[in-house]
Amino acid sequence: MKIDDEVLKKIKSAKTAFALTGAGSSAPSGIPTFRGSNGFWTDKTPFDVEEFNKNPQKVWEWHCEIREMIKKKAPNPSHFALANMQTVFRNFVVVTQNIDNLHQKAGSNRVIELHGNIYRNKCNDCGKIFGEINSKKIPECDKCGGLIRPDVVWFGEPLPYDALIKARAYAESSELCFVVGTSGVVQPAASIPLISKEKGAFVIEINREKTVLSEYVDYSIFGDAAVILPELYERLL
Ligand code: NAD
Ligand code: ZN
């Protein structure tokens, strides 16, 4: 990995840092990215409220399928490197758009989930939270009888308030921001690195290719996050 000495110095001098991660950080684990070419997500698109209201059973089954696919995947070196960053930076936080729980599995203790978690469910009517439910038939809430749905953010839905507020606070107060494997087109997550930049943080992007964020960040490292991040971590020791 090629990295300017000046940039390495900047990273080393920072005391506080966080990472915003996207589907690209889980891609090396074998979980397809959203806009990737293999079409895992694009040939099945029933994940919005309208579709759920029309056909809740179909949407439930679709998410069960995704959850079972994700369950077979393990964290990759990019997840472990980000967990290791906790030993380098005070209160290192991972703000993720992923729903796969892999940062937690790799040992990250402070993970803010902007788009929810595929293993968690909630009542569509009263909001009661449930853990993983293994049922082919869409379950009903024991409190109000409403339908239970996965606790993930669908297109057009607002992000969980607490997660967004916390993520913003880290973005505003951190000296360093890593943007890992995200296309930067899903809002409001994509604006988080820009908030950091406005507040004076040094923003570094790690992605296989140029993104819409590339022209705003301070530095881009192009390549596989599962290779770049472990190398970067080693250079910080
Ligand atoms: P995206 O699919 O729009 O973009 C993925 C980005 O990762 C691209 O910029 C791509 O160039 C980059 N990338 C791919 N492989 C990489 C690698 N090995 N190393 C570095 N970069 C790599 O994903 P997004 O921006 O996260 O938005 C899609 C939304 O869909 C997410 O916010 C999430 O809610 C959902 N989603 C979640 C998962 C998951 O939980 N693992 C997977 C797919 C989609
Ligand atoms: Zn309920």
Image (cartoon, rainbow, N blue to C red):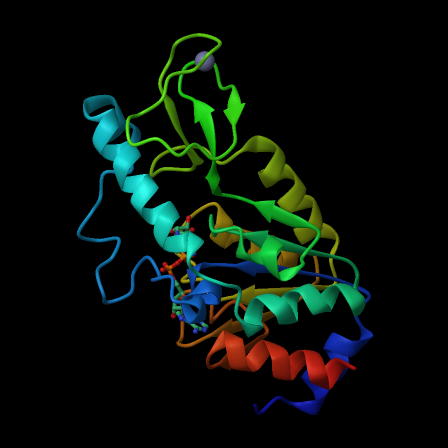
Residue 131 placed where, x, y %? 52, 32
Q: Position of residue 123 (x, y in %)?
A: 44, 20
Q: Kindly tell me whether residue 50 is visible in this rendering.
A: no
Horizontally, residue 207 falls left or right of residue 93, namely left
Look at the picture and state if 21 lies above or below 127. Answer: below
Whether residue 228 sits left or right of residue 89 in the image: it is: left
In the rendered image, residue 53, in percent from the top left (x then y), is placed at 25, 22
Above or below, 82 against 233 in this view is: above
The quadrant the N terminus occupies is bottom right
Quadrant of residue 94 within the rendered picture:
bottom right
104 and 139: which one is in front? Answer: 139
Q: Answer left or right for 11 relative to 148.
A: right
x and y percentages locating residue 206 in the rendered image: 52, 73
Residue at screen point 21% across, 60% down: 39
Ligand 2 shown in quarter:
top left
The answer to whether residue 31 is visible is: yes
- The image quarter in which residue 145 lies: top left
Q: Residue furthest top?
A: 144
What residue is rendered at 54% in x and 57% in y? Answer: 102
Residue sitting at 59 percent across and 73 percent down?
Answer: 218
Quarter of the image for the C terminus: give it: bottom right
* Residue drawn where x is 75% and y is 81% of the image: 236
Give whichever of 237, 185 is nearer the camera.
237
Q: How many marks?
A: 0
